[in-house]
């Protein structure tokens, strides 16, 4: 028998949103959250210290300001890709912090040690050592996340999003250092002060803000692909290949001007631009496919009687989802809107998980988690206040 609409049996709206406990709950979650919060604070302090390398408050302020400017565009790009099947906020926060603090620290320590031992030229350090140290340091976050909680990264788009956020964090701190150095100037570069910072910003912040996210994306995509491989050997090969490609893209970019001069730089810039366009196009295609997967899965779930068919538009399409939240807020208050929002989030996660299980994908505790999400939805149903069914749903 099909489930009745959520409005059929209503309970009073509580004064606060009921607590939700993720099932199964990850061990050490609180400790990791606190640890990354502390690391983030250290990162803020480190960013300030790096900016002070500009020599005066004006230079420090310009360095930090220019580093912040690309962030809204970069964050929006990955937020948009992540809308249909949102990743846990704590992991997205951790990815950014890892890139900006942990990865920078690891890469810097390795580079200083290598330079001290081998006394390499700046060109060699930039072309070979920097890619070989920075990319593994960034990619380590995705590898540890995959090993700790496989269900967090379960496909191409997840790997791409986490890799991008790690790259954004790394580039943010690195850019502060570059802008501070540009403010001071050098014997080789005659432009300094505000003009020097602006020139460097045009190159790094305007023409190549996606550079670091793009380099690490190769590894993120590889991890996303490795998830679907049943053979452990195949997973290792795919992940190793992804790391090699990440380092290769990074090395190609860093060495383009040194080896090929101006023409080489333009050629590599256009080549990486095509790669970025290709990755972005593929990401959009995958994201678009998520809409169809979500609707198909919710329809199947409704046919099983687990949800009412009239709920499907309010759980799948962004426009109708927003209408449902606004209706609940306008008619029943803020808590009712938050209940609708949580119900939508649970339904989305349940639908994608259910689709993966039904198509034979290897999902850790897939069946148990699907039923746990359905139980959480059922607990909210008496408090759910959705708009009236759409006309097409009334006829069905």
Image: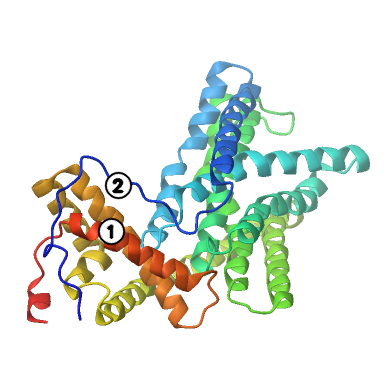
Residue 120's x, y, as percent? 88, 43
Kindly identify which numbered label has been placed on residue 267.
none
Asked which colour scheme the image uses, the reply is rainbow
Please give the name of the residue rendered at 52% of the width and 36% of the height, measured from the top-left corner.
67
Residue 128's x, y, as percent? 79, 53
Q: Is residue 372 visible?
A: yes
Residue at image mark 2: 18
Q: Is residue 262 visible?
A: no
Please give the name of the residue rendered at 85% of the width and 39% of the height, measured from the top-left corner.
113
Please give the name of the residue rendered at 13% of the width and 57% of the height, measured from the top-left corner.
10
Residue 216's x, y, as percent? 62, 57
Quarter of the N terminus within the rendering:
bottom left
- 87 or 15, nearer to the observer: 15
Kindly identify which numbered label has been placed on residue 379.
1
Q: Are marks 1 and 2 in contact (CB under 8 Å)?
A: yes
Quarter of the C terminus within the rendering:
bottom left
Residue 312's x, y, as percent? 22, 71
- 303 or 220, nearer to the observer: 303
Q: How many marks?
A: 2
Distance between the alpha carbons at the discs numbered 1 and 2? 9 Å
Q: Under tag 1, what secondary structure?
A: helix
Q: Say which label, 1 or 2, has the lower sequence index.
A: 2
Give the crowd class for mark 1: few <14, some 14-19, many >=20 residues within 10 Å: few
In this picture, residue 45 sits left or right of residue 80: right
Give the crowd class for mark 2: few <14, some 14-19, many >=20 residues within 10 Å: few
């Amino acid at each position: 028998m099909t489930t009745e609409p959520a409005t059929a049996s209503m309970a009073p709206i509580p004064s606060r949103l009921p607590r939700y406990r993720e099932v199964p709950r990850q061990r050490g979650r609180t400790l990791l959250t606190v640890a990354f919060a502390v690391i983030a604070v250290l990162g803020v302090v480190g960013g300030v210290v790096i900016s002070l390398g500009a020599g005066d408050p004006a230079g420090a302020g310009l360095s930090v300001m220019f580093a912040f400017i690309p962030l809204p565009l970069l964050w929006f790009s990955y937020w948009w890709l992540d809308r249909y099947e949102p990743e846990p906020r704590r992991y997205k926060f951790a990815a950014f912090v890892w890139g900006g603090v942990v990865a920078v620290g690891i890469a810097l320590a390795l580079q200083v040690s290598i330079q001290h031992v081998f006394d390499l030229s700046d060109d060699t350090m930039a072309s070979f050592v920097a890619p070989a140290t920075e990319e593994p340091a960034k990619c380590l976050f995705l590898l540890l996340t995959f090993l700790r909680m496989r269900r967090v990264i379960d496909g191409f788009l997840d790997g791409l999003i986490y890799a991008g956020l790690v790259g954004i964090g790394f580039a943010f701190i690195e850019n502060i250092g570059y802008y501070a150095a540009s403010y001071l100037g050098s014997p080789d570069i005659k432009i300094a002060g505000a003009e020097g910072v602006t020139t460097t910003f045009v190159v790094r912040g305007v023409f190549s803000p996606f550079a670091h996210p793009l380099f690490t994306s190769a590894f993120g995509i590889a991890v996303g692909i490795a998830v679907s491989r049943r053979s452990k050997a195949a997973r290792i090969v795919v992940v190793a290949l992804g790391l090699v490609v990440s380092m290769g893209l990074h090395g190609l970019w860093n060495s383009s001007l040194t080896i090929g001069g101006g023409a080489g730089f333009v050629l590599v810039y256009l080549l990486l631009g095509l790669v970025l366009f290709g990755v972005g196009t593929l990401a959009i295609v995958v994201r678009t496919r998520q809409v169809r997967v979500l609707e198909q899965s919710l329809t199947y779930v409704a046919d099983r009687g687990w949800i009412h068919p009239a709920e499907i538009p309010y759980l799948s399409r962004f426009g109708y989802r927003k209408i449902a939240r606004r209706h609940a807020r306008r008619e029943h208050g803020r808590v009712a809107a938050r209940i609708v929002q949580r119900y939508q989030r649970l339904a989305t996660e349940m639908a994608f998980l259910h689709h993966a299980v039904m198509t034979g994908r290897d999902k850790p505790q897939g069946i148990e988690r699907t039923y746990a999400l359905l139980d959480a939805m059922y607990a909210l149903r008496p408090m759910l206040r959705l708009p009236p069914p759409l006309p097409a749903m009334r006829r069905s």
